[in-house]
Amino acid sequence: MDTRSKKKILKIIIFSLGMVAIVSVAASFLWWYGFFLPGWIKWETKEAEFDQAYVTLDDRRITIRDGGKDGNVVWRTQGDWFVQDLVIKDVDRDGKDEMVLLVWKHGSYGNHRPFWVKKNDKNLKQHIYIYKYDAKRDTRVRAIWMSSQITYEIESISSGEKSFLNVTDHTGNTRVWEWREFGLKLVH
């Protein structure tokens, strides 16, 4: 084999390896940003008043504005969270509404995983997060409960009777959850 043929084969190999690397990076990027989430997911768009703030769920993100629809942005969900649904409701029965989010995010835990869990996985998992809003605090939006991975796939959450939340899975089965002491518990 002459030098010219060897160079041609080397160029083909280098080009092929480059294409494999580009496709791998593109697939990883798309996976990280939720392009391979289940097709049954319905991405909601909602607006609601939340205490003295205004909440918008649009393009898989939550934005909270102080004082109304045109107010200053005081909080947004993280860029790698994909918010599927939103409910504003007094779930903990304290007389003030909470913001309940149905979120897809990477891993089962945040920075504060249990000591017995050695490593947080990177797969997209579904979670329910509950937040309070207080216009008088520097940190106006604060988490009061953040679930680990939900064990079944939820299509939507909605306001139920009293302080109950109706949680419907993607097969149409609805379960009722209620705030108990610290966190949501399945009632029936």
Image: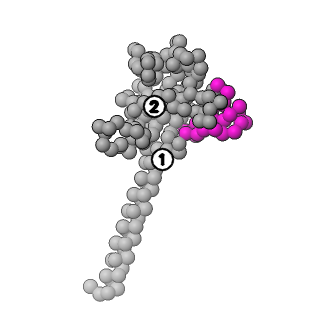
Residue under pointer 2: 146
Q: Which scheme is used to colour this image of the protein?
A: one colour
Name which residue type carries label 2.
Answer: Met
Name which residue type carries label 1.
Answer: Tyr
Residue under pointer 1: 33
Side of 101 relative to 140 (left or right): left
Residue 89 image position (x, y, % from top left): 57, 21
Q: Which is nearer the eye, 24 or 123?
A: 123
Magenta-highlighted residues: 51-77
Disc 1 to disc 2: CB gap under 8 Å: no
Cα separation, mark 1 vs mark 2, equals 21 Å
Tell me: residue 6, above or below residue 89: below
Residue 149 image position (x, y, % from top left): 39, 33
Q: Residue at x 64, y 25 (%)?
A: 51
Mark 1: give few (<14), some (14-19) or many (20+) Cα within 10 Å. some
Residue 126 image position (x, y, % from top left): 43, 34
Is residue 102 visible in the rendered image? The answer is no
Q: Residue furthest bottom?
A: 2
Q: Secondary structure at mark 2?
A: strand
Looking at the image, is mark 1 or mark 2 earlier in the sequence? 1
Mark 2: give few (<14), some (14-19) or many (20+) Cα within 10 Å. some
Q: Residue at x 42, y 42 (%)?
A: 111
Q: Quadrant of the N terminus?
A: bottom left
Q: Which is nearer the eye, 92 or 172?
A: 92
